[in-house]
Amino acid sequence: MNTLTKILILIFSLTLFGCGGNDKKEEVPYGKKEPVKTESKVPASERVELSNKGVGSITKVDLPLVVDNELAAHGKDVYDKLCTACHKAEKKFIGPSPKGILNRRSPEWVMNMILDPEKMVKEDQLARDLLMEFNGSPMANQNLTQEEARAVLEYFRTL
């Protein structure tokens, strides 16, 4: 075989094996063993996790079908005094909006987050994800009583 034929066979072989398929390879950063996951996730503030009760003393909250307007008014007072520096009822601010929160979170999770945000961030993945989504701004513990937290929860039902 002449040299030209050998070169053509070599080029053909390299082309055939070098262009193998359309498989996307995941990028592996230097020093890492696992590929970087590039799938897009739903932001924590929009994620629906109704079975997660969070971490804390609240394990069961029974919500009546009808909103208790007196309790909700008390909750609004508490919310207006202690929460509006970081939360706006209708939009994201420093923290997430409470509007529609009970469509995304269980009442137990909400109350546990209100009562002990430090423990929730430490032990609850969703709370950690929210912390990261909101630029690492931790929720301040306002040292509310269970009754005050329940009133705030009732107010959230009116939003």
Image (spheres, grey):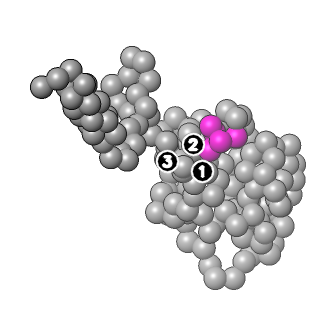
Question: Badge 3 is on which residue?
Answer: 39
> What are the residue bounds of the magenta stretch?
130-134
User: Where is residue 45 shown, x and y percent of the image?
Assistant: 64, 53
Q: Residues within 10 Å of mark 2 (few under 14, many from 20)?
A: some
Task: Label 3: state its secondary structure.
Answer: loop
Toward the left, the furthest residue is 1
Question: Badge 1 is on which residue?
Answer: 44
Q: CA distance from mark 2 to mark 3?
A: 16 Å
Q: Residues within 10 Å of mark 1 (few under 14, many from 20)?
A: many
Instruction: Tell which of 94 and 124 is nearer to you.
Output: 94
Main SS, magenta region, reads helix
- Contact? badges 2 and 1 (CB < 8 Å): yes
In the image, 53: left or right of 43? left
- Comparing marks 1 and 3, which lies closer to the viewer? 3
Q: What residue is drawn where x is 81% and y is 47%?
A: 93
Task: Work out whether 79 lies above or below 138.
Answer: below
Tell me which amino acid carries mark 2.
Asp
Q: What residue is drawn where x is 60% and y is 63%?
A: 104
Q: Is residue 105 visible?
A: no
Picture quadrant where residue 48 is located: bottom right
Question: Badge 2 is on which residue?
Answer: 129
In the image, 118: left or right of 26? right
